[in-house]
Amino acid sequence: MEDTIRKIGREELEILFQMTSSLSSTLELSRILDIIIESAKTLLKAEASSLLLLDESTNELYFASATGDVSERLKNLTVPLDKGIAGACVRSGRPQVVDDTLSNREFYPGIDRRTGFETRSIIAAPLIIKGKTIGVIEVLNKKHHRSWSDADREIIIIIAFQAAQVIQNAQLHLRLQEQQDLLRNEIDSRYAIISASKEFQEVLELAEKVAASTSTILLLGENGTGKELLARYVHRLSKRREGPFIAVNCAAIPATLLESELFGHEKGAFTGATTLHRGRFELAHQGTIFLDEIGDLPLETQTKMLRVLQEREFERLGGTKPIKVDVRVIAATNQDLQEKIQQKLFREDLFYRLNVFPIRIPPLRERTDDIPLLAQHFLEIYAREMNTSVHRIDKDVMETLLAYSWPGNVRELQNVIERAIVLATGDSLDRSCFMLPVETAKRALPDGQGLKETVEAFKISYIQSVIEKCGGNQRKASKVLRIQPSYLSRLLAKYRDSVTS
């Protein structure tokens, strides 16, 4: 390639340099193709140029870009791979130089007949990526009826080489963009805000108002009401939407590891710390960190958390250098933090730092208008994931869903719909698909019985209900219960006097 470049004149090198600069400034494929063919036409002092890409499904070359008045007419035309100079170029993987198309047996006149363009001469080079030909660039009609020179051949080889690389990069970028869009659509579907109730619309209005600010938010509500969902909603509406959203469940991480997870640790900070570890706050820089179950934060960690909220800085475990972060904090809890303050389990100063903009999320039983919408939303998600034809919920079942108190809120509804789809045999969810413990929920708890005995009694009742709904099929029941069949067998053995298998 260096020898080829040395043979090219100064003017041609300048045009090649301009082409390279232009190509490096964009990843838009259509723009890249236009730059390539215009540069090729100028460099080779020709009347027209075009770039064709190979459609492997049809074994045809299609016009991806073309110059001149006939470019619009070329858009829907193709060249069979076994015909034409372009086809020969792709088949052989070598440049083709034709000074007189009329005397060349490879020439395919079909395109000229359909466009009205007269092709007198052609020079073409294949676009090759990793040994595979993906298309061809061709330049037509050397001006002043001159023949193509050796320098022309060298130039088109250079253009084809560079074109192949940038086209590959653009196509890769396009595929990544498409995958990101698909992923984003899937995430948006998963975390969509589904609501028709006045109660939740008021919550959304508050979220929309605070999203544009940097204020710390405290989300209050029962388990399963959608606190993380609302946090993500605020993040997507904020100026930090392009930054990371990092979710941390403070109750799910052991107290001994929590500080390291939140703030990171230096290499050698403790036994087993063999590398530097960046914590969640660092990872959330210029984005949002969501601290779920903040009420379970240990007192010793609360002190460090207070400093982060006040100063937006911290040290890694085992470190001495302050680390500054630009992060928006959204915390959530289902506990009464003021009661925990009275019990000396939560710092009052931390509470006031968190409670800048509190938002209470009502439980599902207070917004029953949302139940039909949410149920249908979850049905569509899981029906798509499980590739089933289920698309509706029977009316009498919906009445049951509306009558239930939903102690587990939206998360419980989601699980109920997922289990129902597992059990569905037709295109709708009927009563046979549901194992909603309506009677259990309404039944008074026995007096004089301890917590352990009450939990055991409920477990027995629920397992029995699931097995009955599954027609005695333990494997199917274990799938609905989300436990291993072997574990279900052990439970049945344990409760053999109470559960009928």
Image: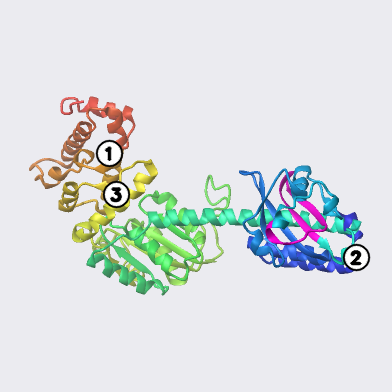
- Earlier residue among tags 3 and 1: 3
User: What is the basis of the colouring in this image?
Assistant: rainbow
Q: Is residue 137 magenta?
A: yes
> Which residue is found at the position 69% from the left and 60% from the top?
115
Crowd around label 1: few <14 · some 14–19 · many ≥20 (10 Å): few
Q: Helix, strand or loop at disc 1?
A: loop
Q: Which mark is residue 426?
A: 1
Q: Is residue 77 magenta?
A: no
Horizontal and vertical percent for residue 110?
Answer: 71, 52
Q: Helix, strand or loop at disc 2?
A: loop
Q: Quadrant of the C terminus?
A: top left
The amino acid sitting under disc 2 is: Gly
The amino acid sitting under disc 3 is: Gln
Please, what is the dominant secondary structure of the magenta stretch? strand
- Earlier residue among tags 2 and 3: 2
Horizontal and vertical percent for residue 184?
Answer: 46, 57
The amino acid sitting under disc 1 is: Gly
> Which residue is found at the position 24% from the left and 51% from the top?
408
Instruction: Identify the residue position indicated by label 3 in the image.
Output: 414
Horizontal and vertical percent for residue 435?
Answer: 21, 40
Segment colored magenta: 114-140
> Which residue is found at the position 24% from the left and 47% from the top?
393
Q: Are marks 2 and 1 in contact (CB under 8 Å)?
A: no
Is 312 on the left or on the right of 73, as rendered? left
Q: Look at discs 2 and 3 and give the one toward the viewer.
A: 2
Marks 3 and 1, Cα distance to the nearest angstrom? 20 Å
Q: Helix, strand or loop at disc 3?
A: helix
The residue closer to the viewer here, 389 or 115, is 115
Marks 2 and 3, Cα distance to the nearest angstrom? 70 Å
Q: Residue 81's quadrant in the figure?
A: top right
Is 414 on the left or on the right of 400, as rendered? right
Instruction: Identify the residue position indicated by label 2 in the image.
Output: 9
